[in-house]
Image (cartoon, rainbow, N blue to C red):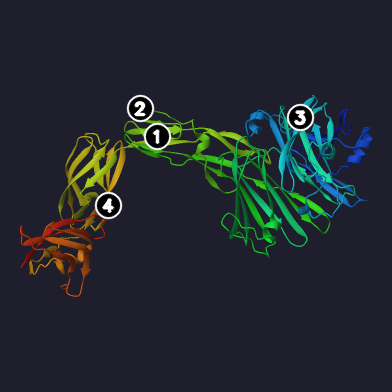
Amino acid sequence: MTRRGTPLAPLETWRVASPTPRSGKEIRQRLELGPRQTSRYSVRQLVRSAGLTGSYGGIKIYAGAKAASLDTVHFLFDEQAGFSAILKMFDHEPNAKIEKRDLTRTGMWTLRAPMLALSQPDSALGFPDGAVLQPQIFVRNTTGNPVVASLRFNWRGDSTTGNAPGPTVRLAPFETRRIDVAALQDAKTLPKEAHWTAVVLTTRGIPDEVMAVAASYDESLRYGAQTPFNDQLSYRWEGGMWEYDVQHDSVITVGNGGSKPAHAAFTIFYNQGKEQYELEQTLQPDSQMWIQVGKLIREQLPDKNGKTLPLDLTSGSYEIRDLTHSGTGTLFEGKVIYDKTYGNVAYGCAGQCCYVGARLVSDPLGIPFLGTTTNGVNGNDNCGFTDNVSSGFYGNWNTANHSIATVNTYGAHAGAAIGATTSSTHGLLLSPYGRYQCTNQTYTPGGGDNVNPTITSMNPQTGQQGTMVPVVIKGSGFGTNPTLTTTAGSQIQISGKTSNGTTINAVFTIASSLAPGRYTVVVTNTTQATTSFYVTAPCNPTVSSSTLTVSCDGKTVRQGNLIISGQDEPNVNNTQVSATGDVVTIDVQGSPYKYSSLCPPASICYDQNYIGCKNAQSSSGHINWNVQIFCSNSPYPSKTVATSETINCQ
C-alpha cells in the first residue's frame, strides 16, 4: 500500500477483513502512512491475528481524507507450486449514483467478466492435452446490509455459442461467496464443450457495493487465467501490444453490453502503425466477436478489404470502435496473451476512451433569412480523437429568441428574422470519473446564431478597370436601407443604391488603378451576406466572322471561321464558344474547335464544321456563333457576343 503526495498530517486508514465466507465477520485495524510511504502486509498474519477462520474473504482500505493519494496492490502466491497472481482492487465511490454508472440505462448496476476459461480450455491457449481447469467466481458484499446479485453466462465453444441463466446470490452483510462454475458445467447449466464464458453480474444496489473476481486454474496452479470484472462500456477502446510467435499467442474479444445491436469495428495496427487490418461485425446484445491473432496470421485470413497479415508479423496494437452508438457506446473488451514458456496466460486491458469536452460544430452559426442550416455537436476525447456526437443531443435543442430563429429536434435552425440570438442543447457523453472510470455525464454546449440576409444572385459579377457598372443584387432580408460595401474600399465607389428588401440596385464606379482580382461585396442589415465581384483589366476584343460563298451539295464538310482579336486580346483568360446552324440550310457538325495554323498573330481562332444544303426555300444560311469572353482570371464572363456567319450556296 503506497501513499502519494506530501501533506503534513498522517493518512489514517482502516482495513476491513472478512474472510469467514458465510458469517461475514468484520474486523477493523487502524493504520498510518507517512508521505510517500509504502507498507506491506501479510493477509495470512492479519487473518490469524484477528482470529478469523475460512479460506477466502475480502479486504477494504478506507481513507477518510485524501483517498486519491492512496494506491494499493494485492497479490497471492504459492511458493511450492511456483504460482502467483495479482488480484484486482476496486476503487469505491461512496456517493456513486446508479444513473451515473448504469451505462445502458437498465436501472441496474452491471459488472462483466468477458473471458472466463471453462473446464475444457480452448486449444488457442496452448495448454497441454488433458489439462482441466477449475473455473470459479468470488462475489463479495462490501456493505453491512444484505444484497442480492444475479449471474448469467454467455458461453462459446468451438463452433457454437449460447447463453444461460446463473444462480441468484443472496449475500449476508460483508459475506464473500464462491461460485463453482465447473459444478455448473457438471449440472449442465453450462455445456461441457464450452471453452469460454462471459459472466454478467447485476444488482439493484448502489455501484461498488458488490465486487467480484473470476479465475480458472488447474489443480497444479501451473495453467490457468483470470478475467477481471468491471462495469465499463465505451465507444472506443485503444489496445496495447498483442504478441504472436512460437511461444506466444493472443486472443481478444469484443462484446456488446447494450440492449440493441451494435456494429463493432476491430482494427489491428502493425508496421509501426503505418498499416492496418480491419474486421467488422454486428453484435447482438450480450454477444461477442473473438479474434485469435495467431490464427489470422497463420491461416492468412483476409480482412474486410481482402488484406492479409504478414506471415512474419509478431506484434502490434489494436483498436475497437462502436460504429452504431456515438457519445456513449456499448462495447466491452478483453484480451489474454499465452506464454508457453511458463504456461502463463496474462490478462491485458485496453484503454477506455471517454470525452473530456463538447462543443457546437459551428459557433456562431450562420442561418439564411427564411432558410435553414443544421448545427451539430463534436466531442473531443482523452484518446486524442474528435467525433461527431450529434445524435446524443437530439430532442434537446432550443434557441434563446424564437422570433429570430427556431430549431428542431435534429439541430436544423430556421431563420425567422434578421438578427442575432443563441442556441444550446444537452446530452449524455461518456466522460472521466474518478481515477480509472468513465461514466455518463451531461454536457450543455451552446453558441451564437446569426440570421443573415441571403444573396441568391448578382448581375454582373465582373467589371473592368475604369468603368461604371450597374449591378443588381437579388436575395432576401435586405431591408429597405441596407449598407453596401466592398473590400476594395474607396476604389469602388457605390452610388444610386436602392432596395425593396429582395432586390438592390446600385452603380459600381471602378478606379482605373484598382488591381484585377476578386473582391467581396458585403450587404449589411444587422447581420451580413456576402458575394464575390471580379475586377478585370480592359477586355473588349473584336469578334468577327466572314461571309462565305461555297458549293452546297449536302454532303461535303466545310469549316466556318471565327476570329477574336484586337488590342485587348492579351487580357483574355478564356473563351467559351458555341455555334448553331440554320435548321434547313446549315447542318452544324460537332463543336467549335480552336485552330492556330492559319490564325492571325495575337488572335484566337475557332473553326466550326458544317454541311450546306440547297433547298427551295433559301439558297443561303447562317452559322450563329455565341462567344463568352473571360478576362483576368475571372470565373464570370466579362462579355458575351452573338455574331452570325453567312453561308451563300451556289
Which residue is nearer to you in this view: 500 or 609?
Answer: 609
The three-letter amino acid code for the residue at tag 1 is His
Q: Is residue 265 above or below residue 90?
A: below
Q: Residues within 10 Å of mark 1 (few under 14, many from 20)?
A: many
Residue 38 appears in the picture as rendered: no
Q: As drawn, which residue projects farthest toward the bottom? A: 597
Residue ID for mark 4: 519
Which of the labelled discs sits on residue 413, or is there none?
A: 1
Which of the labelled discs sits on residue 403, or is there none?
A: 2
Q: Earlier in the sequence, mark 4 or mark 2?
A: 2
The reply to whether callout 3 and callout 2 are in contact (CB within 8 Å) is: no
Instruction: Give how far across and how far down residue 378 sits, in percent.
Output: 50, 42
The reply to whether callout 4 and callout 2 are in contact (CB within 8 Å) is: no
User: Which one is closest to the eye, mark 3 or mark 4?
Assistant: 3
Q: Residues within 10 Å of mark 4 (few under 14, many from 20)?
A: some
The three-letter amino acid code for the residue at tag 2 is Ser
Q: What distance separates the C-alpha of mark 3 from that of mark 2?
A: 54 Å
Q: Tell me the element at label 4.
A: strand
The three-letter amino acid code for the residue at tag 3 is Ala
Q: Tell me the element at label 2.
A: loop
Q: What distance separates the C-alpha of mark 1 from that of mark 3?
A: 48 Å
Which of the labelled discs sits on residue 343, or is there none?
A: none
Q: Earlier in the sequence, mark 3 or mark 2?
A: 3
Instruction: Give how far across and how far down residue 592 sits, in percent.
Output: 21, 64
Instruction: Specify the quadrant that holds the C terminus.
Output: bottom left
Q: As drawn, which residue projects farthest toward the top? A: 145
Residue ID for mark 3: 149
The three-letter amino acid code for the residue at tag 4 is Tyr
User: Which one is closest to the eye, mark 1 or mark 3?
Assistant: 3
Q: What distance separates the C-alpha of mark 1 from that of mark 2?
A: 12 Å
179 displayed left or right of 7: right
